[in-house]
């Protein structure tokens, strides 16, 4: 780490720890309840692994619809590659929107599992989610596991989990909001939602429309995204919920700067639906759900495909013994699809499908009046192609005092090759499962009566059989399992709350990799300052990225290229009335020239302005 970087980190950390400030939210409260780490509600301080939370208030602060860019800025060791002012581009290995956690991430992303309310979101053929589908207007909170979580979620949770938890109407009556914005590059955003609750029935519905001409010629993007959620609470113990989402999008990709290739056009329709029945008693809590994801894709290079992913899951947390929690679960997934192009051609237009079935048990025992929490468990998984495997996890959390928690854990993860990797493009039906093993230890502290929260985590994640493209004999390239990888790092998070009207959030991560990896910066720093005064709200955010590989020797260019950049963003809001506010925001205010994907220069300084209404 250079002296300049070290000074920047120390200054930001001191600022976050000492500035008289306030925030509406508390992202690091060690006592807040989360569901992603155990399937049932549990305090963060009693979990052995690290879970980051982005709250609804923080989500409401942003003026953009796609929420992944904010998650990337705020969560240490998590990075999402981007290309433009909105939209993440095409589907496939050259797309943006790929997620990396602690240097583990696919291209396209299939090693970080994305969930919506606990339901898997990856596509049947390519095995990854579509990043444009996750919009701020639908979300109550985001929970992130940094590290393997295959014990609960099976394949694709090899490197971590993002769980997008959607809103539901809590109070009787009608409420809603609408936000209309316009900005640089003819960018237009409309977000609107409404919720209703009467007695046992509640529903939530939203609609989002984004479009832009992009900061380069032929970089247009458009998406229409609709979401509906209906709930019926039979009594205090049971609730039935159904939801449906459909997104229709079109994106243009002009290729790398100075490219002579034709403009790539992607037309996609993606959707999901699920039905769940949840239960909650004094001694038990859990539920069962069924889900289906579907999609149609039509690309200008001739690719036409249909994807499906459906399954079911049931789990129950049992508190049969004092200070003890046993979580039992079973799930089944079947995913696949049909594509009109394949190499070899024999697999074109064939319906290709794989299935996975798993069962798991996790036992948590609290000792000495909940001072110590011991957790251990395992998952047995049966795969239609790769047979069976066992995935263990264990950990300990020690609440030294009410405001301090020390934790350590060991977890394993895996990812099964996608249908695309096995059968369609540079296929290799002999590929092995990718595997990871993660050891981490951390300490969480709350100071000054809960006003200052800090968290430090050290980790070492090792893996094997990573699937890579081999261009040594290209064309055509081939696909193979590579050797082992070893990543080590440190993660820091802090926020400060006071009785005044200012708040500061801070995060920093350092990652050491034995081999270069795309979309995995060595240094990643974020500092955000919010200030409220009367009817005005101001926010300033700084994001520093260093040692980001945008090309490696394993890619087509066959050379290592890194990028460093510092971005400054700001926004302001003015309360026009009790329910209406005017906002303006600016990104890349220093007008930096930088790339996240090689050959795709990011936009310079750009602005967005508009009006938001709540009722």
Image: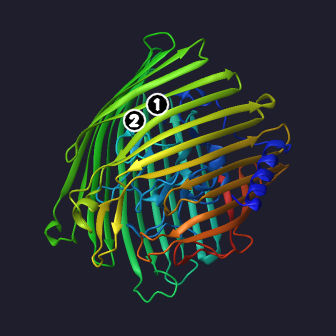
Depth check: give the residue in front, 463 or 282.
463
Depth check: give the residue in front, 194 or 452.
452
Mark linked to residue 181: none
202 is higher (above) or lower (below) than 84 = above
Q: Residue 81: image x %, image y %?
A: 53, 64
* Callout 1 secondary element: loop
Q: Which residue is found at the position 30% from the left and 38% from the top?
A: 312
Between disc 1 and disc 2, whose residue precedes?
A: 1
How is this picture coloured? rainbow
Examine the image and state in which quarter residue 376 appears: top left
Q: Residue 572: image x %, image y %?
A: 76, 59
Q: Is residue 163 visible?
A: no
Examine the image and state in which quarter residue 295 appears: bottom left
Mark linked to residue 152: 2
470 is higher (above) or lower (below) than 288 = below
Q: Residue 355: image x %, image y %?
A: 23, 45
Q: Residue 396: image x %, image y %?
A: 53, 26
379 relative position to 579: left or right:
left
Q: Residues within 10 Å of mark 1 (few under 14, many from 20)?
A: many
Separation of disc 1 and disc 2 at Cα?
Answer: 8 Å
**Quarter in which the N terminus is drawn:** bottom right
Depth check: give the residue in front, 333 or 99.
99
Q: Which residue is found at the position 66% from the left and 47% from the top?
A: 58
509 relative position to 478: left or right:
right
Mark linked to residue 38: 1
Q: Is residue 565 visible?
A: yes
Q: Residues within 10 Å of mark 2 (few under 14, many from 20)?
A: many
Asked whether the beta carbons under mark 1 and mark 2 sit within 8 Å of each other, the answer is yes
* Callout 2 secondary element: helix
Residue found farthest to the top? 322
């Amino acid at each position: 780490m250079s002296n300049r970087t070290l000074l920047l980190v120390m200054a930001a950390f001191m600022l976050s720890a000492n500035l008289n400030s306030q925030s509406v939210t508390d992202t690091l409260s060690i006592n807040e309840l989360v569901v992603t780490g155990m399937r049932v509600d549990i305090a963060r301080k009693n979990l052995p692994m690290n879970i980051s939370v982005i709250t609804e208030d923080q989500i409401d602060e942003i003026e953009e619809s796609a929420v992944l860019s904010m998650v990337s800025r705020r969560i240490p060791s998590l990075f999402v590659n981007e290309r433009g002012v909105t939209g993440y581009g095409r589907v496939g290995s050259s797309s943006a929107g790929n997620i990396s956690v602690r240097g583990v991430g696919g291209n396209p992303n299939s090693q970080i599992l994305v969930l919506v309310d606990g339901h898997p979101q990856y596509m049947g053929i390519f095995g990854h989610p579509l990043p444009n589908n996750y919009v701020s207007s639908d979300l109550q909170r985001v929970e992130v596991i940094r590290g393997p979580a295959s014990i609960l979620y099976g394949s694709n949770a090899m490197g971590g989990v993002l769980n997008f938890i959607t809103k539901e109407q809590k109070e009787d009556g009608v409420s809603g909001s609408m936000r209309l914005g316009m900005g640089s590059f003819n960018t237009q955003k409309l977000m609107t939602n409404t919720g209703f609750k009467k007695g046992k029935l509640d529903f939530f519905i939203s609609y989002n429309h984004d479009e832009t001409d992009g900061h380069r010629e032929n970089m247009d993007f458009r998406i229409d995204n609709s979401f509906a959620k209906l709930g019926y609470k039979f009594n205090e113990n049971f609730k039935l919920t159904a939801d449906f989402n459909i997104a229709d999008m079109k994106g243009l990709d002009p290729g790398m700067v100075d490219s002579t290739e034709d403009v790539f056009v992607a037309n996609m329709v993606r959707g999901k639906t699920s039905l769940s029945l949840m239960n909650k008693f004094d001694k038990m809590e859990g539920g069962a759900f069924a889900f289906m994801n579907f999609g149609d894709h039509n690309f200008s290079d001739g690719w036409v495909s249909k994807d499906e992913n459906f399954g079911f899951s049931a789990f129950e947390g049992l508190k049969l013994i004092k200070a003890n929690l046993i979580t039992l679960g079973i799930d089944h997934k079947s995913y696949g699809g049909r594509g009109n192009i394949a190499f070899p051609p024999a697999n074109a237009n064939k319906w290709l499908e794989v299935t996975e079935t798993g069962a798991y048990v996790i036992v948590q025992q609290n000792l000495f009046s909940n001072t110590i929490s011991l957790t251990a468990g395992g998952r047995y998984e049966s795969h239609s192609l790769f047979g069976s495997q066992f995935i263990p996890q264990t950990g300990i959390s020690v609440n030294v005092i009410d405001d301090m928690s020390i934790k350590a854990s060991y977890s394993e993860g895996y990812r099964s090759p996608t249908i695309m990797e096995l059968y369609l493009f540079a296929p290799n039906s002999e590929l092995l499962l990718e595997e990871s093993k993660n050891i981490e230890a951390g300490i969480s502290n709350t100071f000054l009566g809960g006003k200052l929260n800090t968290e430090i985590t050290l980790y070492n994640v090792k893996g094997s059989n990573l699937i890579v493209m081999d261009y040594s004999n290209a064309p055509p390239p081939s696909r193979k399992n590579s050797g082992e990888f070893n990543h080590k790092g440190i993660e820091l998070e802090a926020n400060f709350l006071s009785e005044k009207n200012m708040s500061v959030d801070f995060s920093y991560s350092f990652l050491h990799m034995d081999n270069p990896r795309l979309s995995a910066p060595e240094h990643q720093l974020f500092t955000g300052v919010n200030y409220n005064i009367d009817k005005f709200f101001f926010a300033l955010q700084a994001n520093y990225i260093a040692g980001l590989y945008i090309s490696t020797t394993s890619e087509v260019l066959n050379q290592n290229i890194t990028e460093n950049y510092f971005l400054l963003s700001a926004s302001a809001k003015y309360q026009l009335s009790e329910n209406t506010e005017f906002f303006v925001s600016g990104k890349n205010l220093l007008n930096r020239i930088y790339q996240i994907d090689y050959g795709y220069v990011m936009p310079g300084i750009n602005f967005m302005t508009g009006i938001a209404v709540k009722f």
